[in-house]
Image (tube, rainbow, N blue to C red):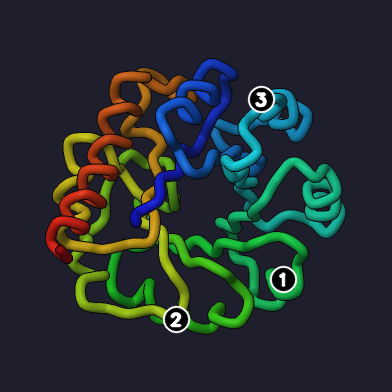
Amino acid sequence: MIRVKVCGLTRECDVRAAAALGADALGFILAPSPRRVTLERAASLVRGLDPFVARVAVLSDPTEAELREVIGSRIFDCLQFHGGEEPGRLAGLPLKTVKAFGVSGREDLERVEIYAEAADYFLFDTKAGGASGGTGQAFDWSLLSGRSFSRPFILAGGLGPENLPRALEKVRPAAVDLNSRIESATGVKDAVLMARAILAARRSNMDETRGDS
């Protein structure tokens, strides 16, 4: 079953819509980003949310004090690291961890396995123009085709309703991460695009189930 995460949420109406549409996880960016929210804002956005929807904090090279504050807030179920964090920084944390990797070529996958003992999940996003994530661009999915990793991985990078079925034909991730391609403006999710993308992921699950029967 491919899970769906909606990331870069900044508005309460989008949080409620994503949950109502069946998103498995919601991502709140606490790192520098046009979609950045404060910890206080994230707490407000998740208030009253279904307890079975996972809440993910997106971080990039947080200080020890920042990391303690995020964990101590008890808002989140998972920490997603997008910076240059070394494996030891992720090890032993009390929440599930995701290590994100920006991908533009095969060489970007060479260091993935050094995080095998530290991260619970890997995430592969698009690296473009010095940015890893939030670019609205997809990377070459064939770089992942036929590869196996020691941890389940999440596919990100320019995924939306128009290209998600094709991406899932090429790659079978544990989950997909939706952000800029389901927006009408930066940080503003489009309910129709979000619904279509989540439906595309669910259809892929149904097609796989039928194929196994």
- Kindly identify the amino acid type of the residue bearing the numbered disc 1: Arg
Q: Is residue 155 visible?
A: yes
Q: Is residue 3 left or right of residue 168?
A: right
Q: Is residue 14 above or below residue 180?
A: above
- The local crowd at label 3, few if under 14, some if 14 to 19, many if 20 or more residues have their Cα within 10 Å, is many
Who's the residue at 38% across and 61% down the image?
174
Q: Secondary structure at mark 3?
A: helix
Of circles 1 and 3, the one toward us is 3
Q: Nearer the N terminus, badge 2 or badge 1?
A: 1
Q: Are marks 2 and 1 in contact (CB under 8 Å)?
A: no
Q: CA distance from mark 1 to mark 3?
A: 28 Å
Check disc 2 and give the amino acid type: Ser
Give the spatial CA distance, label 2 vs label 1: 19 Å
Q: Quadrant of the N terminus?
A: bottom left
Q: Residue at x 21, y 77 (%)?
A: 146
Q: Residue at x 34, y 28 (%)?
A: 194
- Report, in whole angstroms, how far the alpha carbon at label 2 lies from the one at label 3: 34 Å
Which one is in front in this view, the residue at disc 2 or the one at disc 1?
A: 2
In the rendered structure, the answer to whether residue 109 lies left or right of residue 187 reads left
Residue corresponding to mark 1: 89
Q: Residue at x 54, y 83 (%)?
A: 114
Percent position of residue 26, x then y: 54, 39
Q: Is residue 37 above or below residue 206?
A: above
Q: Residue furthest top?
A: 13
Choose the circle earlier in sequence order: 1 or 3.
3
Q: Position of residue 161 (x, y in %)?
A: 23, 35
User: Left or right: where does residue 66 sit relative to residue 118?
Assistant: right
| Residue 168 versus residue 149 in the image, above or below | above
- Point out which mark residue 150 bears: 2
Give the SS element for disc 2.
loop
Mark earlier in primary sequence (2, 3): 3
What residue is shown with label 3? 45
